[in-house]
C-alpha cells in the first residue's frame, strides 16, 4: 500500500467539503477597471441575478470612490455605487447574496458616502489598502463597523511588502474590528508555494480573533485558480472570483472553475455557465472588452511588476510584439 | 521572525536552480492532434530553430504511426515522422536540441519503422502506453534501447488508473531499460495536491534505478503550468511543454511560462517570444487552429473524462453553449 504523505498543515483536500467557505463575486468591481466602470445596468443585473441563483455569498458591485477625487464625467456608476443605483439592481426583493462595495483608503469620502447600515442596500464594506495606508484603512473599518456593516481589509500588492512589515500590519489588523483579511496578489506574481506560506502567515496572525482569511488572485501566470485552491486547502475560507475570470489585465480566478472545484451543494454551476455564454462571450467576441491571460501579463507577473505596462501594451497598435515588450521591461528594470 | 514551514519532501523552491532539469518541446507532436499533423515544413522548421536557439533539450517532432493502421491520405507527415522529413527540418547541421518521436503502443510498426540509431536523425523514442498495453510498450522500449536510442515510457490517462495497478506498472517500468517515466495527465483532471502525491509515487518507484521522472500536463482546468511547477519542485526533472501552450483541446503547459519560471541560464526566453508572435498568434487570429482553455474543457477535466466530447462541441455549430454541454455530460455520465 502507498503511504500518502498528506500535508499535515492542510485544512482539507480537494475532496473535503468545507461549509465555512464563502465566495465573493467581484466581476463588476474588478471588471470595472477595464472599462472605467461603464457597465450597463442590464449587465450588472444579470451578474446579480446569476449570483443569487448560483448561491454566491457576496457580490461586489463596485467602488465607493470620492467624487471630488474622481469626477463623474470620467467614470461609470460603479465607481461610486450610489444607493439608488444599487437599488435598481437588487430591486425590492433583495436575494440572499449580500452586496459588497470596495472602499479604497485615501480615495473614499467614507464619513459621508457610507451611510448607516439601516439606510443602505450594502452589507459589507471591503477596505482596500496599501501597507502605508493601514492607519487610514483601519479608521475606515471602525467607521463602517460602527455604522453596522461587515468589514474586511484587503491588503494590496503584498508581493512588494517585506515580511517583517507584513507581520506588523497583520498584527494591527488582528486587533481591529474587521471580520476578515485578504491575501491580495495584485500583480499575479505569486507561485503556489508562496501562497501556501502566506496563507499560513495570515492564519497564524488571525488565530484566536475569529477573523477569517481570504484570497484574491490574478491570472498573470495562469495561476489564479491554482493559487486560490491551494490557499483554500491551507485554510483560507473567503474566495474572490469573477465570472469567466473577467478583471483587469489577466483577470481573476474564474467563478465557474472554483464552484466546480468546491463541490459545495450550496452553489449551483448552471446559472454561471448560462451567464457566461449569454453575457460574457459576446463582449469578448465583439472586442468590446479584453481580459484574460496574455503573454505580456506573465512577463510583468514573473517580474513582480504592476500590470499597467502590459495593459498599455495590449491597448497599443502592437499588442502582440512580445519580444519588444520583454526587452523594454528588462531594460527599464535594469 | 516567521518560521516558514518548508515542505520537507520538496526538492527545491521556486528560487532553486536545478541543472538536472530537461525540457522537451512537444508543440508539433501534441499540436498535430489538432490538425491531423498537417503542419507546413516552414512552421516545423521555425519551431525547431526556436528550440535550438532557446536551448531546449528535446523537440518532439511527431509520431511514428504505422501506415497500415493510419493511411497516409488522412494524415500529415508528422504522424509518421519519416527520416527524410526530419532531415528537411534539422538540415545538415543539426543543432544541440535532440529529436524525439512518440511511438504509440500497438499503433507503431516499431521493428521496421524505427531504424538503428546510426541510420536515424532521431535521438529519443518516447513510448506512449495505456496501462493494459505495458507489455507491448516495454518490448518497444527494449527494441529502441538495443537500437541505440534514449527511451521513455509515457503512461497515459493515469487519472483513470487504480493506485495498486499504477504501483505494479511502475515496478515493471523500473526494471526496464527506459531512461525516464512520465506522469501524463491526459484529461487535465488532476489537482496540484494529486500531482504532488503522484510525483512522490513515481520518484519512489524509480529510486535507485537512475531513471528520471517527467511531467506532461494539459490545461483543461488552467492547471497545466501550476501542476508542472509543483511536480518539478517535488523532484520531477523532465518537463513537457509547448510553444504558446499549443496542443489538443485545452493545450499544454506553455513553454514560455516554464522557461521564465526556471530561471535556468541554459534557456533563453527571447526566441520563444519571437516565435509566438510570428507563427502562433497568426494561426489563432485567422482561426486556422484553436487551442487553449475553454469552459467545456474544465467540465470534462473536473469529471475526469477524455476531452473528445469537448473538442467535438467546440467544432460544432454551438461552440459556446456551455450549459447544454454540461447538462448532456451530466446526463450521459449518470
Image: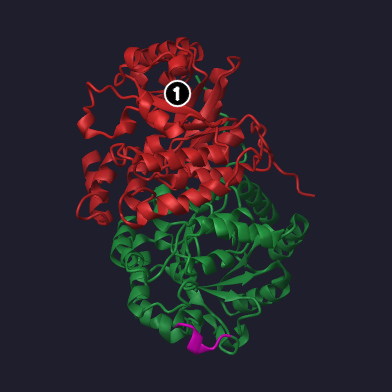
Chain colours: A red, B green
Report whether B86 appears left or right of A212: left
Q: Is A88 displayed left or right of B322 in the figure?
A: left
Q: Which residue is mark 1?
A: A122
Residue at 42% over, 50% down = A279
**Who's the residue at 60% across and 77% down the image?**
B144
Q: Nearer the viewer, residue B41 or B152?
A: B41
Start-end of magenta stretch: B70-76
Q: Is residue B197 above or below residue A65?
A: below
Q: Nearer the viewer, residue B11 or A257?
A: A257
Q: Is residue A259 visible?
A: yes
Say whether residue B245 is magenta. Answer: no
Q: Whole-percent x and y of residue A130?
A: 35, 23
Name the residue located 21 percent from the left edge and 51 percent from the top edge: A316
Count of number-bearing discs:
1
Residue A41 point in image, percent of width and height = 36, 39
Q: Is residue A237 above or below residue A109?
A: below
Q: Chain of mark 1?
A: A
Q: Residues within 10 Å of mark 1 (few under 14, many from 20)?
A: many
Q: Quadrant of residue B57?
A: bottom left
Q: Position of residue A255 (x, y in %)?
A: 51, 43
Amino acid at each position: 500500500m502507498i503511504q500518502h504523505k498528506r500535508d499535515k498543515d492542510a485544512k482539507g483536500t480537494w475532496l473535503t467539503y468545507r461549509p465555512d467557505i464563502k465566495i465573493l463575486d467581484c466581476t463588476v468591481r474588478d471588471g470595472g477597471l477595464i472599462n472605467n466602470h461603464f457597465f450597463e445596468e442590464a449587465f450588472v443585473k444579470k451578474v446579480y441575478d446569476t449570483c443569487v441563483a448560483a448561491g454566491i455569498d457576496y457580490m461586489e458591485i463596485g467602488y465607493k470612490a470620492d467624487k471630488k477625487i474622481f469626477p463623474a464625467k470620467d467614470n461609470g456608476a460603479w465607481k461610486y455605487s450610489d444607493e439608488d443605483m444599487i437599488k435598481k439592481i437588487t430591486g425590492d426583493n433583495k436575494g440572499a447574496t449580500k452586496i459588497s462595495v470596495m472602499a479604497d483608503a485615501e480615495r473614499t469620502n467614507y464619513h459621508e458616502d457610507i451611510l448607516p447600515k439601516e439606510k443602505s442596500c450594502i452589507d459589507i464594506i471591503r477596505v482596500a489598502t496599501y501597507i502605508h495606508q493601514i492607519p487610514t484603512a483601519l479608521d475606515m473599518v471602525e467607521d463602517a463597523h460602527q455604522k453596522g456593516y461587515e468589514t474586511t481589509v484587503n491588503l494590496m500588492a503584498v508581493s512588494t511588502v517585506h515580511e517583517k512589515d507584513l507581520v506588523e500590519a497583520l498584527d494591527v489588523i488582528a486587533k481591529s474590528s474587521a471580520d476578515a483579511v485578504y491575501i491580495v496578489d495584485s500583480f499575479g506574481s505569486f507561485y503556489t508555494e508562496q501562497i501556501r506560506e502566506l496563507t499560513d502567515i495570515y492564519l497564524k496572525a488571525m488565530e484566536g480573533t475569529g477573523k477569517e482569511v481570504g484570497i484574491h488572485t490574478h491570472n498573470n501566470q495562469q495561476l489564479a485558480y491554482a493559487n486560490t485552491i491551494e490557499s483554500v486547502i491551507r485554510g483560507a475560507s473567503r474566495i474572490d472570483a469573477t465570472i469567466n475570470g473577467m478583471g483587469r489585465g489577466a483577470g481573476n480566478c474564474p467563478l465557474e472553475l472554483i464552484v466546480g472545484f468546491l463541490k459545495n451543494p450550496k452553489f449551483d454551476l448552471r446559472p454561471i455557465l448560462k451567464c457566461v455564454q449569454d453575457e460574457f462571450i459576446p463582449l469578448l467576441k465583439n472586442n468590446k472588452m479584453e481580459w484574460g491571460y496574455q503573454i505580456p501579463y506573465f512577463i510583468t507577473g514573473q517580474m513582480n511588476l504592476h500590470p499597467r505596462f502590459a495593459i498599455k501594451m495590449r491597448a497599443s497598435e502592437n499588442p502582440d510584439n512580445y519580444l519588444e515588450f520583454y526587452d523594454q521591461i528588462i531594460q527599464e528594470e535594469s
